Image (cartoon, rainbow, N blue to C red):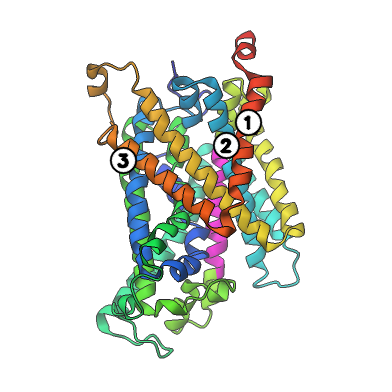
Amino acid sequence: MVQSGGEGLKRSLSKRHVQLIAIGGAIGVGLFLASGDAIASAGPSLLLSYLLGGFFIYFIMRALGEIAVEYPISGSFSAYAHEFISPCAGFIVGWTFWLLWTVSCMVQVTAIGIYCNFWWSELPRWIPALAALVCITVSNLLSVKSFGEIAFWSSIIKVITIVLIIIVGAIILLFGLGSGDGNVPGISNLFKYGFFANGLKGVFFALTMVTFAFIGVEFIGITAGEAENPEKTIPSVINRVLLITLSLYVGTLFIIMCMYPWPEFSQGGGVEKSPFVLTFAGLGIKQAAAIINFVIITASLSTANSGMFSNGRMLHSLALQKQAPKFLAKVNSRRIPSNAVIASFIFCLIGVVLNVVVPAGVFMMLLSITTFLGLFIWGAIIVVQMYSRRGKSADDIAKLKYPMLFYPYSNYIVLAALVIVSVMLAVKNETRTTFIVGPIWLILLYCIYKFFVNEKKLNKN
């Protein structure tokens, strides 16, 4: 049976650490960079997309929370898939999660390289990208508590920025202040140009962007093996994180679309075209682009930092299950899975190379691959939770400390929603390639397991 504990890791992450690691993973470039495209495609109805997405994601987190509270271990859903479904399922889920955050870290450090060019246009992008990757790796090789503090304060910068935008925007709306560029702020801006940019279709298509924006909340499960008092910490964090994250997303986008007519948020164009830049500029802050550029870089660092943390723990867990090289299970004197962190760093160096040689189209493809892999992981969480209930008596289920709400109907509804979002990815031209890369990866993992890892070889070891 799944063993509770951190398998050599140290329980040094407090509730605030776990909470900000999850928030830090979920609030990043999806909000600061991609919100312009999302608004342009859905209009103010994007708010409905976030509320709908948040509803489904809450149940995903409740499913993960039920198991994580009972079995608070490092590796989380990979170890659970291994135990409750099959070793093959654990292998596929674990390595897919690792790929998800390896690709995501590549995206984040590439974004850092791009946006450092805002200040130093002649600086080769690979230099800040490499510097960022080294920094987050060092952060993850420190003590768990030190990492938690770094993750906490880097996430705080993003949260404070968003809260300030909401507060200042609310003051402008309440007192009818001018925006400074001829636009008249007001709730009427939500409806003046139509609430729906592309009808209900726009609401559902925007769910693909909402999915990318929320990827990272599942970090809560990964931290279970190193969280203090997980029985109390995990439920508290799950209940708070999604509410906080959703409030920040919806609150910020509501304020931004009230302050400016939403058709003015043109697609693309770099940081100068960001809705956040236009909002700051409208407040008369001349250095709006520079401020947002700094926040974007901080956001990317924070997200990549959380991703590296999760990758190290996932490789450590896979090694303990004999589904990854044995040396990856080693922890150092500070009880950090240092070999797993360094291995993840080496693979993330591919992102530095891509920062030099690939065109923008491939960069966007990496974003869509991240979304596809995120949908797979979320679906796996739901399925694993359903398998974990098998064989449990009514008394066993009644004793669960943090049971899934409305089980099993909520599970079926969430799985249906994930399938719908996957279809949206397949329909959109710019994300269709993920349905080539994603399935190939999953088939490759299955073949690797069957020919090189399988249960017989595990039993021999």
The magenta stretch is: 293-311
Asked if the magenta segment contains residue 11, the reply would be no
The residue that disc 1 covers is: 445
In the image, residue 456 sits, relative to residue 268, either above or below, namely above
Residue 327 placement (x, y as % from top left): 68, 24
In terms of secondary structure, where does tag 2 sit? helix
Q: Residue at x 32, y 49 (%)?
A: 55
Q: Residue at x 29, y 80 (%)?
A: 188
Q: Amino acid at mark 3?
A: Ser
Q: Is residue 102 visible?
A: no
Are dots 2 and 1 in contact, CB under 8 Å? yes
Q: Residues within 10 Å of mark 2 (few under 14, many from 20)?
A: many
Position of the N terminus by quadrant: top left
Q: Residue at x 22, y 17 (%)?
A: 395
- SS assignment for the magenta stretch, majority: helix
Q: Amino acid at mark 2?
A: Thr
Dot 2 or dot 1: first in sequence order is: 2
Q: Nearer the viewer, mark 3 or mark 2?
A: 2
Q: Which mark identifies residue 96?
A: 2
Q: Residue 58 appears in which quarter of the rendering?
A: top left
In terms of secondary structure, where does tag 1 sit? helix
Q: Residue at x 62, y 33 (%)?
A: 443
